[in-house]
Amino acid sequence: MTSLRDKALLMMNIHCLGRSLATASSSLLPVQLPAQREVHFWYVLPDEVKSTNLLNQYLEILSPCEKENIITMRGEQIRKRALLARALVRTTLARYQTNCQIDPKSLMFRKNNYGKPELDWPYADDWSRPPLHFNISHTSSLIACGVTVGSAIGIDVEEKQRRLKNDTLAFAQRFFSPLEIEMLTHIVDPELRLQELIKLWTLKEAYVKALGKGFSASPFKSFTVRLGDHVKGNFHTPPHMISKEHDITVETSDELKNPSSNWQFGLLELAGSHYAAVCIEQDSIDAGNESIPIDLTLRKTIPYVEDECVSASDSAVVIGGLTRLSTSD
């Protein structure tokens, strides 16, 4: 009888070379836990992961359920992206220094009442589990994982060259709030209008995912994201400076005159080809204090191979939100 692992290898067109592959977390760069109001944003470009040996290694750290989910997907590239997404989550979370070393394969997950994945730490008397929060997002060309400590997080990534089957305004009528539709209507240039729509979509996705209640409980039309007059697609903030474009707010239908201060956003152009949005929940002490920025550390990675701290202006540009990119690696 063919094992689950063999089926997965066959489905993904990955050929095992008959040798055992190391999966110990010691081969991953250890990382300190994020500080308060700090976000670690890890991403991988699927096209840069070409080694079948490496893909085999990623497969080895997945749970049987994760493997089963992947092999039922149709299309080799779809299966590869799903594998990379799960491997990125496991290898990223295993890096964080706790009182004990963590093997990525040993990590366990649960879902909240709305289906959002969460870490399920085993109970142990000799160490306290870190309150890690994470969220993932992916396109066909970029997969990302955001991590915080003690703050709910939602992230989204979208391709800048994304094209819609329908007219931009027709699309907006289906998903956006009246105020957002009005804003888009005032943009005459079709390409600029499309870019603003993609930015809005990215921010709205990040917000809903940070809430952790799912799209059915938080439909896009039930809230408005205001980018403000200063969030421009052609504004390039120096990479290590605080963005001055800090007027991104969210208003729910019952508080249109009182924007929520519990959530803070960051919006950036990433790798010259994507928009990335980050939304985190502020704690009770900082809520309403808009002068404290989000510290954002970007790392491009190929797990078990290389990690690169991203800070160059041609790779990451903050275009919205009170956010600063970290200079440390």
Image (spheres, grey):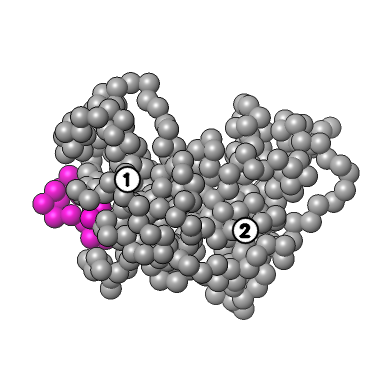
Q: Quadrant of the N terminus?
A: top right
What residue type is disc 1 on? Asn
- Looking at the picture, how far across and down is residue 153, in whole percent? 40, 56
Give the SS element for disc 2.
strand
Q: Which residue is more in the foreground, 40 or 100?
A: 40
Give the SS element for disc 1.
loop
Please name the residue that numbered disc 2 is placed on.
Answer: 307
In this image, 244 relative to 19: left or right? left
What residue type is disc 2 on? Asp
Q: Is residue 277 visible?
A: yes
Q: Which residue is more in the foreground, 180 or 212?
A: 180
Write the residue at 75% across / 31% down: 13
- Looking at the picture, how far across and down is residue 300, in whole percent? 56, 54
Image quadrant of residue 105?
bottom right
- Looking at the picture, how far across and down is residue 38, in whole percent? 42, 66
In this view, which residue lies farthest toward the right? 18
Is 290 placed above or below 190 here? Answer: below
In this image, 183 relative to 147: left or right? left
Please name the residue that numbered disc 1 is placed on.
Answer: 234
Q: Look at the image and give the residue range highlighted in magenta.
A: 247-263
Q: Main secondary structure of the magenta part?
A: loop
In this image, 129 relative to 169: left or right? right
